Image (cartoon, rainbow, N blue to C red):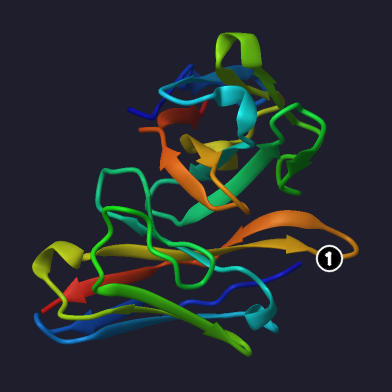
């Protein structure tokens, strides 16, 4: 079974840092691009970042560029999101998702909640 | 930056047909994907590449894309279809390369 499990969320103060992880299983992780998507409480989906299978191509939403860094370790079947200079507006559930073709995402993990508050 | 516009809400009676639109400039030239999200759950892909259905998604779900509008159609709507639906594209223009989501449409089954 294809599975993605996020971890690392929690409460952090404005200006702080957090590192999210996404553990993949049930498929050849190194063959797929991966993504982070977030959803603020009661709001819609917002794409955060994408990384290609070999990390050659990396893209960020304008709202996080320069503050967030996406990375992956194919040997560990893991995806990461390093989040620095966090702001209140970064508060959201963060999902990792596999790209199965042309930026169509399946499956999604269950999400991890990041709360930025003093 | 590229913008996708969805109606905030659509209501439909059980057994009828629901149509959820997604508007964007020349969206017909892009591949559109649709996701269903039920409360407290992660999104699920229901339509990809405008009109293809992943395995396990009922044939009642279909999609189309032309001109400036993509449409998700749900036939013979059931109570279990009540959810938020999001359209999504990859925008690769001269000045940006981004995944773009629509604002979402809440489908209410009356």
Left-right relation of A51 to A3: right
| Residue B61 placement (x, y as % from top left) | 30, 71
Left-right relation of A107 to A17: left
Q: Mark 1 falls on what kind of element?
A: loop
User: Which residue is at the front of the view, B12 or A52?
Assistant: A52
Based on the displayed image, in which of its 4 quarters is residue B80 positioned?
Answer: bottom left
User: Which residue is at the front of the view, B86 or B9?
Assistant: B86
Residue at the image point whose x is 63% and y is 54% from the top: A102
Hey, which residue is sitting farthest bottom in the picture? B67
**Which subunit holds the residue at mark 1?**
B
Hey, which residue is sitting farthest top in the picture? A76
Residue at the image point whose x is 43% and y is 55% from the top: A43
In the rendered image, which residue does mark 1 sit on? B93
Q: Is residue B110 above or below residue A54?
A: below
| Residue B9 placement (x, y as % from top left) | 33, 77
Based on the displayed image, in which of its 4 quarters is residue B96 positioned?
Answer: bottom right
Residue at the image point whose x is 65% and y is 19% from the top: A16
| Residue A37 placement (x, y as % from top left) | 54, 43
Residue at the image point whose x is 42% and y is 30% from the top: A113
User: Which residue is at the front of the view, A81 or A74?
Assistant: A74
Mark 1 neighbour density, 10 Å: few (under 14) some (14–19) many (20 or more)? few
């Amino acid at each position: 079974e294809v599975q993605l499990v996020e971890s690392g969320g929690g409460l952090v103060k404005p200006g702080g840092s957090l590192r999210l992880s996404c553990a993949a299983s049930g498929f050849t992780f190194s063959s797929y691009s991966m993504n982070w998507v977030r959803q603020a409480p009661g709001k819609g989906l917002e794409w955060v970042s994408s990384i290609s299978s070999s990390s050659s191509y990396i893209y960020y939403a304008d709202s996080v560029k320069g503050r967030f860094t996406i990375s992956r370790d194919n040997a560990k079947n893991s995806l990461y999101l390093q989040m620095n200079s966090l702001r209140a507006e970064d508060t959201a559930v963060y999902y990792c998702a596999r790209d199965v073709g042309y930026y169509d995402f399946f499956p999604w993990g269950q999400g991890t909640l990041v709360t930025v508050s003093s | 930056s590229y913008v996708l516009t969805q109606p905030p809400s659509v209501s439909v009676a059980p057994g009828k047909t629901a149509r959820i639109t997604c508007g964007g400039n020349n969206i017909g030239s892009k591949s559109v994907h649709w996701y269903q999200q039920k409360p407290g759950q992660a999104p699920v892909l229901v339509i990809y590449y405008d009109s293809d259905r992943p395995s396990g998604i009922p044939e009642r779900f279909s999609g189309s894309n032309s001109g400036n509008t993509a449409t998700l159609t749900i036939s013979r709507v059931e109570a279990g279809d009540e959810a938020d639906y999001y359209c999504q594209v990859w925008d690769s223009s001269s000045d940006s390369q981004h995944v773009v989501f629509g604002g979402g449409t809440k489908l209410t089954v009356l």
